[in-house]
Amino acid sequence: MCRKATGLLLITAFASCGSPQLQPRVLGGPLSTPELIKGAEIIIVGTITSITFGKVVHTSVPLFPQLNDCLVPVRISVSVENVLRGSIPNRLNFEYFGTVCGTMGPVESPQGGSRSMFFLRNDSGRWRPLADYWRNRIPVLTGRHGNELLVGKPIEEAISEILLTPSDNYTTAGLVQALATATSESSSLIGPSATERLLVPLLNHSDMQVRVQACLELNAFGNSFEDCARRLVDENLDLMARQGFGAISPGLAVDLERLANYSDPDTISRAQRLLPFSKIAAPPAPTPLLPPALR
């Protein structure tokens, strides 16, 4: 009898239930986003609601023989939120082969409750990613988006907007991570100039870490965004002058050091004097004020 996993985050085992046996397809590495777009029959954004593991299979993986006895069939259930290509119901299952052995590199490792963009094809009546083992989806860390964001837009532009535009139920930590990981994806799809247009509004975000990360990504394109770098670094250095070295977190201090390199010489010099002190774990409040000579 086949046992099916139901409910959020539930993980159990499943049998083939008489369906044609799927064969693993392990490539030399993960497919690029343009390759995923080109090869997918359907492209969706959705949240993983259940993960179901089968038994380890013995197979031949010519490129990676160490995986011959490591691959396991996995069935993923997804609650569909956006359909970028194809026509599908609100929920679907797809199957792929993951590994139970040690891994290196961007290997597929789904998490229940996480939101991603999935690129799937039909294989013997079942949905599958284009290849197994390697990561075959793009995490979506910007919350849930309405379909109006997609209307009339080329699929590359729609993907970029989903990856970089904050929407319902996003977190600032997730948005910072999205900027750090998805900006290059967007640039490869729609180019640096169009990606810059998505990032510039985030320079006015309410969260400082988001503003700093957006400025870092904009400057990384090589264009001149010196003003945002100078403004954000000076703003934080002024805060330190008023409240002491513990006014900003060590992690933010590290990012501000990077950002200062895109600024003017005076701001760079000031940052070099002050930011190293904030990279040390912040002491408990209240923190001592900076001496006047350092302000």
Image: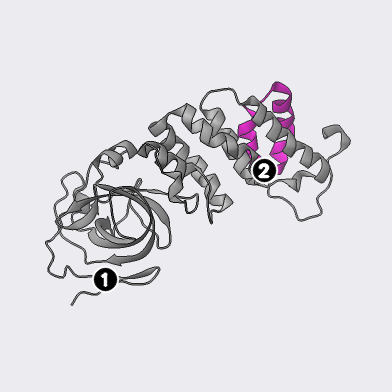
Mark 2 burial class by Cα count in 10 Å: few <14, some 14-19, many 20+: some
**Secondary structure type for disc 2:** loop
Identify the amino acid type marked 1.
Ala
Q: Is residue 257 magenta?
A: yes
User: Above or below — where is 292 with respect to 66?
Assistant: above
Q: Can residue 70 be seen in this view?
A: yes
Q: Which of marks 2 and 1 is nearer the N terminus?
A: 1
Identify the amino acid type marked 2.
Lys
Whether residue 253 sits left or right of residue 93 in the image: it is: right
The stretch of residues the image draws in magenta is 253-278
View extreme (bottom): residue = 1
Q: Is the magenta stretch mostly helix, strand or loop?
A: helix
Whether residue 20 sits left or right of residue 170 in the image: it is: left
Q: Is residue 205 magenta?
A: no
| Display colour scheme | one colour
Coordinates of residue 31 in the picture (x, y in percent): 29, 40
User: Above or below — where is 219 with respect to 21?
Assistant: above
The quarter holding residue 271 reads top right
**What residue is rendered at 43% in x and 28% in y?**
191
**Secondary structure type for disc 1:** strand
On residue 94, which mark appears? none
The quarter holding residue 268 reads top right
Coordinates of residue 21 in the picture (x, y in percent): 13, 61
View extreme (right): residue = 292
Report the residue marked by disc 2. Answer: 279
Coordinates of residue 55 in the picture (x, y in percent): 21, 67
Camera-near label (2 vs 1) is: 1
On residue 13, which mark appears? 1
**What residue is rendered at 47% in x and 30% in y?**
194
**What residue is rendered at 64% in x and 25% in y?**
226
User: Above or below — where is 54 with respect to 178?
Assistant: below
Q: Quadrant of the N terminus?
A: bottom left
